[in-house]
Amino acid sequence: MQVKTNWTLAEVKEIYNTPLLDLVYRAATVHRENKAYAEVQISSLISIKTGGCKEDCSYCSQAARYTTDVDVQPLMAIDQVMKRAEVAQRNGASRLCMGAAWREVRDNSDFERVLEMVTKVNDMGLEVCCTLGMLTYEQAERLKNAGCYAYNHNLDTSSDNYQNVITTRTYDDRLNTLNNVRKAKLSVCSGGIVGLGETDDDRIKMLHTLSTFEVHPDSVPINALVPVEGTPLQDNKRTGMDEMVRMIATARILMPKTMVRLSAGRNEMSIAEQAMCFMAGANSIFAGEKLLTTPNPDFDTDMQMFKVLGLTPRKAFKDKKPEEKKEETVA
């Protein structure tokens, strides 16, 4: 199937509004044509620096201006990260994501420590993903050279709805960071959150933005809001399973070769609900008891689900070109 990057808003809207079972059938067909549909990547996410963030993201427990039960923690020691990485790898994870509650990356000793973490985790044979806030092209290059495989920077919502959720940075700031990531030849990971109070049109517009990048993101996380007490969105209702399935299925059809990640919110989903998401085209999850600061199913629970559904964990670096793998081995 040829990848299309010139979707119109009307086309995206038509796909999104397809009756749910027809939408899932179409997405499942696309998924089977383009991916090993029963293969799911297991990623593990570590909060390497927690809380105290200057941003005002209205969903986030780590914003300093909100009173939540999150304790501010400084940047983790390298050996702590390595122990967590070893546990994740033993439990089947092929990607380790390291997240820091920073507004932006600064060229200081903390960044130097992160670069060392990246190198050491990469040497273990895990794909390393970082989510550290805004960064420059030069910083993205340094991450790449240290062994970083991917960088996550979510759009969160549509450009129209963005200022209702975050006011301390702009949508263009996010797009600029993603441009720097792509320019540095890092794998781009960017998606959004369902349940921020957005409309269906906002969801459609966000998917339209992602699917009309010059090159599709390599992975698109679809998160269900986990309301956190003390944040402005603490009273938002739980996202319905049908809403998650609709978002995942539409993303799969629009971006057939992209990894679509069933991310935050899985703790409230049954195996049957998650199965619908996998059928609709999700082929990645985050495993481990915490997803930054919110609850998440543990590894054993997920392995039981994989057994029930006949899913297999995806190996690391499968999307690398043969020559890239060869260069890495020689180095």
Image (cartoon, rainbow, N blue to C red):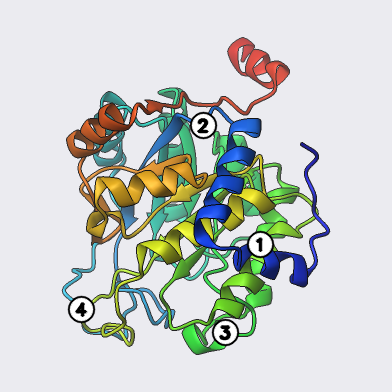
Q: Reading the chain from its start, which is encountered first: label 1 or label 3? A: 1
Say whether residue 44 is left or right of residue 187: left
- N-terminal label among 2 and 1: 1
Percent of width and height locating residue 239: 35, 70
Among the two numbered marks 2 and 3 on one chain, the one whose residue lies closer to the N terminus: 2
Pick whichever of labels 1 and 4 is earlier in the sequence.
1
Of the two numbered discs 1 and 3 in the rendering, the one whose residue sits closer to the viewer: 1
Q: Which label lies toward us, 3 or 4?
A: 3
Residue drawn 64% across the image and 40% down it: 30
Whole-angstrom CA distance, mark 1 to mark 3, is 21 Å
Q: Could you tell me how far apart the alpha carbons at marks 3 and 4 are, in whole angstroms?
A: 24 Å
Is 304 displayed left or right of 313 in the figure? left
**Secondary structure of residue under mark 3:** loop
Q: CA distance from mark 2 to mark 1?
A: 21 Å
Q: Is residue 6 above or below residue 46?
A: below
Q: Which residue position is annotated with label 2? A: 37
Judged from the image, the secondary structure of the residue bearing numbered disc 2 is: loop
Taking the spot 62% from the left edge, 53% from the top edge, the residue there is: 139
Kind of residue indicated by mark 3: Asn
Tell me, for residue 161, which label it has, or none: 3
Q: Are marks 2 and 3 in contact (CB under 8 Å)?
A: no
Q: Position of residue 12 (x, y in %)?
A: 70, 65
Pick whichever of labels 2 and 4 is earlier in the sequence: 2
Q: Residue 15: give x, y in percent of width and height.
A: 66, 62
Query: Which amino acid type is shown beneath numbered disc 2?
Result: Tyr
Nearer to the camera, 298 or 272: 272
> Would you call the spot at circle 2 few (<14 residues within 10 Å), some (14-19), or many (20 or more)?
many
**Left or right of 234 in this view: 214:** right
Q: Nearer the viewer, mark 1 or mark 4?
A: 1
Nearest the viewer among 255 and 328 is 255
